[in-house]
Image: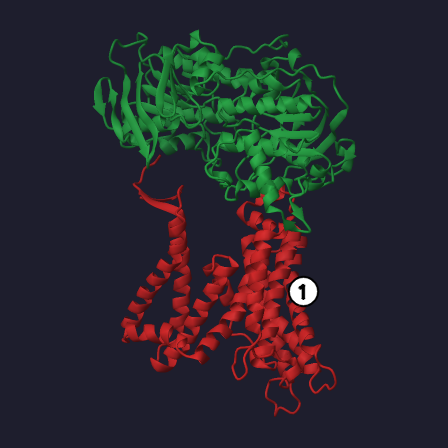
């Protein structure tokens, strides 16, 4: 691929791509409601907004996956019609999706060939892959099968696919959500290089620190409208968040120094074989959580988080009773109901289909996890009125917005359902609470509410274990942090004595070699920095 | 070109209720075309199928007698199917219930003295036999992971051959001129008639009672809740602490018991003796009935009546119009397909997406 000649960062008054007055209606709902956006060559432009703000819709319009109800898209000032992705690609628009669309059983080159014009010689293609890889430091062996690659390497395939089309505009949707901090650094280097070549990048992320570091302009969406534009380098993460949600986000109160209570949740050498072909085996996991503290477990998705959660909740039984002790009761062989009766509560990652049955009402979903601990059945007969009043108590205590008195759980937005599910467990005043990804896909206000509720629960003496991929979240609420990698848990260390870099290395398998796989990656700090 | 099914976000309750009716009307149109293609008058066929059976007391009773076992078996199956557990062997459980319950009737033939206990014992034994027979595939599934679909289906043939052997062999009436059937049961071993001089027996009342009980169990008990959650969201059911294995055993016991009870009710009600065959396929037709009734007991009652009506009407059509029995079967299958299709359309919006390599 011929590298583009370096260009001045902006092209004068005419933007490379413009979207003006974009309206997209789905029925009565306006996902985009008069959005204007200008993207210039040589800039990394951030698109910020909460879930449901209209980011995805706008992005799909720009990539030709959706056609706007009203409004126009321009390319160098000329109105263009993007009726399908081919049309968008022909204009030089490329996209790197959040969820990879790769065939696990095919090799890197085969996956790339799938989207290239037919009849392209395989050897030529491999040469071009190598060439692009060398130019941008995106090293990949074209012959490797995809199933053997890490998430970061898979993303490189998507990026190379995109770059082979020599795009003028690259749209990236939450590109760092699956990467380790080290891998993310490598990605940033690539993105900065693309920018310096004069390409435009539209960067969609909810990680405000990244946006501040990488982007020179940001357009902020809320409720389908543009509510602000700024230079994120001149803003703080808090001010950006405030623009996104439209209210000042309350900072969660740091935990008051609670004297560490007794050990309430103890794992001793917990080992579990992988539950299936794609599961992760847990290897000698040991951990102790005391009453009054929040312990965080960091890690990249797929390193045993779900398996660890299941072993804690009792959905998967441990081989030995003593491997899991909850309030000094050997619980390894006890089912989830028995563990709940002993005062433990659990909130799994997946809201719909695991923590809640989406087609059932909120009161039925209260019965789901509380039937034994809130006396919601007597002699096998359900106490519907009690379930309804419990659901009401949860919705009012946790400010759950819902349509109708007792709607199906699946009709709630992600944030509201998550607040409901957290409230369902927290109102039981559990002595031990295990939460997997407490604020995944939840808007900033709801996330702050949930984190505060966790801190308050710990403040009342409960042992809280939070499994999260969001390091910012863990640093915000956890007193100690451990890292889960490939089913192995590192010792929990006080959050104040560790750093993102140290944790990032552990998340990537503590392999210093990891950083060398992406050329041009700044060497991450090996020694822990002492403050965060 | 690709067909996309996207869930409708705002489903209207009216449309949900109306969709089976529309499906029924569509089935009538297609059936009418088939009748016309066979050279008969669709209007006349409609009258024979759907009006004539409802116009006379005896045929109304026949419809009820056909509907009762279907409704009872299908209500039991609804527990299985709601929990995504597939008992295909209700026919076998029906037969085993009839056989073992009927055995009591044969054994007590000619007994004197107080015989009030005979009929209740027959019903209990028939129910238990169906339950135990249903538990075989359940245990195989729970213990060894064997597919219940295959085992329950195969056990149907075992049950049928067992009944055939018993009726021709050990339980044959010694004074019956070598006809392959048992003695005719005493009155004490027969279900009483609901009205003097009619054919309607107490099996109909049993079926109605079962529907009421099933409705209450499904909506009001923790067990019914378990069944609903497992069906709606298996992972959430495990999170709730409900055991897959216990539920599998329970729903097989319920559906087997219901089928066994229907079997003995048929033997002690309509037939009055053991024969090599006691079911015209109730256990299989009940699967259609269960899904036509959307796995709700009240819906199953309606569906059982519709299927019974078309069956009785089909007999009339065979006699009066010389239309084959296969037409009735095809119509019942068509009805199921259309009801399921209409349900899908009321739940999902269908879009044709032009071929795009997205």
The type of colouring in the image is by chain
In this rendering, is residue B269 above or below A381?
below
The residue carrying pointer 1 sits among few (fewer than 14), some (14 to 19) or many (20 or more) residues within 10 Å by Cα, namely some
Residue beneath the point at 65% across and 85% down: B186
In the visual, does B164 lie left or right of B198? right
Residue beneath the point at 51% across and 39% down: A409
The hue used for chain A is: green
Q: Chain of mark 1?
A: B
Residue A479 sits in quarter? top right
In the visual, does A310 lie left or right of A200? right
Query: Quick one: A57 or A153, which is closer to the camera?
Result: A57
The hue used for chain B is: red
Residue beneath the point at 38% across and 21% down: A221
Q: Which residue is mark 1?
A: B132
Q: Residue A318: horizontal and vertical position, in percent?
A: 72, 37
In this rendering, is residue B281 above or below A125?
below
| Any part of residue A511 in sight | no
Q: Residue A521: horizontal and vertical position, in percent?
A: 50, 13
Residue A181 sits in quarter? top right
Residue beneath the point at 59% across and 44% down: A385
In the visual, does A523 lie left or right of B63? right
SS category of the residue bearing label 1: helix
């Amino acid at each position: 691929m011929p590298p583009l000649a370096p260009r001045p960062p902006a092209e004068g008054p005419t933007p490379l791509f413009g979207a003006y007055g974009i309206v997209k209606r789905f029925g009565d709902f306006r996902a985009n409601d008069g959005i204007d956006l200008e993207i210039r060559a040589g800039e990394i432009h951030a698109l910020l907004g909460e879930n449901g703000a209209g980011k995805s819709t706008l992005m799909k319009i720009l990539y030709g996956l959706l056609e706007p109800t009203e409004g126009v898209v321009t390319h160098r000032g000329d109105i263009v019609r993007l009726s399908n992705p081919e049309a968008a690609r022909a204009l030089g628009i490329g996209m790197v999706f959040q969820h990879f669309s790769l065939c696990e059983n095919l090799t890197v080159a085969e996956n790339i060939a799938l989207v290239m014009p037919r009849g392209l010689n395989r050897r030529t293609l491999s040469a071009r892959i190598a060439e692009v890889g060398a130019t941008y430091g995106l090293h990949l062996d074209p012959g490797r099968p995809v199933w053997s690659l890490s998430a970061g390497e898979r993303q490189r395939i998507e990026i190379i696919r995109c770059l082979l089309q020599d795009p003028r505009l690259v749209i990236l949707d939450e590109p760092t959500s699956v990467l380790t901090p080290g891998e993310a650094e490598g990605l940033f280097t690539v993105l900065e290089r693309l920018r310096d070549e004069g390409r435009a990048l539209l960067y969609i992320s909810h990680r405000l620190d990244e946006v501040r570091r990488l982007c020179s302009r940001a357009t902020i969406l809320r409720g389908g409208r543009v509510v602000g534009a700024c230079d994120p380098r001149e803003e703080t993460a808090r001010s950006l968040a405030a623009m996104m949600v439209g209210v000042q986000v309350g900072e969660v109160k740091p935990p008051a120094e609670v004297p560490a209570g007794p050990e309430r949740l103890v794992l001793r050498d917990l080992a579990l074989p992988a539950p299936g072909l794609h599961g992760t085996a847990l290897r000698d996991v040991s951990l102790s959580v005391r009453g009054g503290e929040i312990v965080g477990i960091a890690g990249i998705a797929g390193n045993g988080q779900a398996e660890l959660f299941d072993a804690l909740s009792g959905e998967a039984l441990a081989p030995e009773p003593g491997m899991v002790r909850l309030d000094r009761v050997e619980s390894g062989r006890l089912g989830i109901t028995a563990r709940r009766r002993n005062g433990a509560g659990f909130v799994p990652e997946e809201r719909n289909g695991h923590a809640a049955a989406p087609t059932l009402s909120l009161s039925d979903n209260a019965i789901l996890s509380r039937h034994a601990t809130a006396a919601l059945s007597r002699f096998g007969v359900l106490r519907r009125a009690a379930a309804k009043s419990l659901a009401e108590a949860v919705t009012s205590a946790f400010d759950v917005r819902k349509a109708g008195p007792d709607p199906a759980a699946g009709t709630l937005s992600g944030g509201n359902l998550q607040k409901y599910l957290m409230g369902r467990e927290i109102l039981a005043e559990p002595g031990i609470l295990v939460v997997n990804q407490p604020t995944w896909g939840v808007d900033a206000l709801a996330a702050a509410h949930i984190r505060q509720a966790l801190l308050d629960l710990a403040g009342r003496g409960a042992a809280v274990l939070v499994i999260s991929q969001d390091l910012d979240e863990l640093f915000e609420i956890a007193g100690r942090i451990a890292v889960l990698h490939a089913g192995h848990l590192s010792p929990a260390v006080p959050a104040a004595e560790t750093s993102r870099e140290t944790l990032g290395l552990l998340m990537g398998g503590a392999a210093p070699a990891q950083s060398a796989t992406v050329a041009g990656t700044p060497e991450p700090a090996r020694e822990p920095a002492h403050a965060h | 070109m690709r067909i996309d099914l996207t869930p409708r976000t705002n489903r209207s309750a009216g449309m949900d209720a109306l969709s089976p009716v529309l499906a029924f009307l569509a089935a009538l149109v297609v059936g009418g075309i088939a009748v016309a293609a066979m050279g008969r008058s669709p209007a006349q066929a409609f009258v024979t199928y759907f009006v004539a059976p409802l116009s006379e007391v005896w045929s109304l009773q026949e419809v009820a007698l056909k509907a009762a076992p279907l409704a009872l078996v299908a209500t039991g199956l609804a527990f299985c199917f709601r929990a995504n557990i597939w008992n295909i062997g209700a026919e076998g459980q029906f037969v085993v219930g009839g056989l073992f319950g009927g055995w009591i009737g044969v054994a007590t033939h000619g007994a004197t003295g107080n015989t009030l206990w005979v009929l209740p014992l027959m019903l209990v034994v028939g129910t238990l036999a169906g339950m135990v027979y249903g538990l075989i595939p359940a245990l195989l599934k729970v213990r060894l992971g064997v597919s219940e679909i295959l085992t329950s289906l195969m056990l149907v043939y075992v049950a049928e051959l067992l009944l055939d052997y018993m009726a021709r062999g050990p339980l044959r009436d010694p004074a019956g001129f070598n006809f392959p059937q048992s003695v005719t049961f005493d009155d004490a071993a027969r279900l009483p008639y609901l009205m003097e001089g009619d054919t309607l027996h107490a099996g109909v009342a049993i079926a109605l009672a079962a529907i009421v009980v099933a409705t209450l169990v499904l909506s009001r008990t923790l067990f019914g809740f378990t069944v609903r959650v497992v069906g709606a969201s298996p992972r959430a059911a495990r999170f709730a602490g409900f055991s897959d294995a216990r539920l599998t055993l329970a729903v097989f016991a319920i559906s087997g018991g219901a089928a066994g009870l229907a079997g003995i009710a048929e033997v002690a009600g309509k037939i009055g003796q053991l024969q090599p065959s006691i079911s015209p396929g109730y256990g299989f037709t009940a699967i259609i009935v269960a899904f036509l009734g959307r796995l709700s007991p009240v819906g199953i009652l309606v569906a059982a009546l519709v299927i019974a009506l078309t069956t009785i009407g089909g007999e009339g059509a065979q006699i009066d119009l010389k239309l084959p029995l296969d037409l009735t079967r095809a119509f019942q299958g068509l009805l199921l397909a259309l009801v399921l299709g209409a349900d899908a359309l009321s739940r999902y919006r269908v879009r044709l997406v032009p071929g795009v390599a997205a």
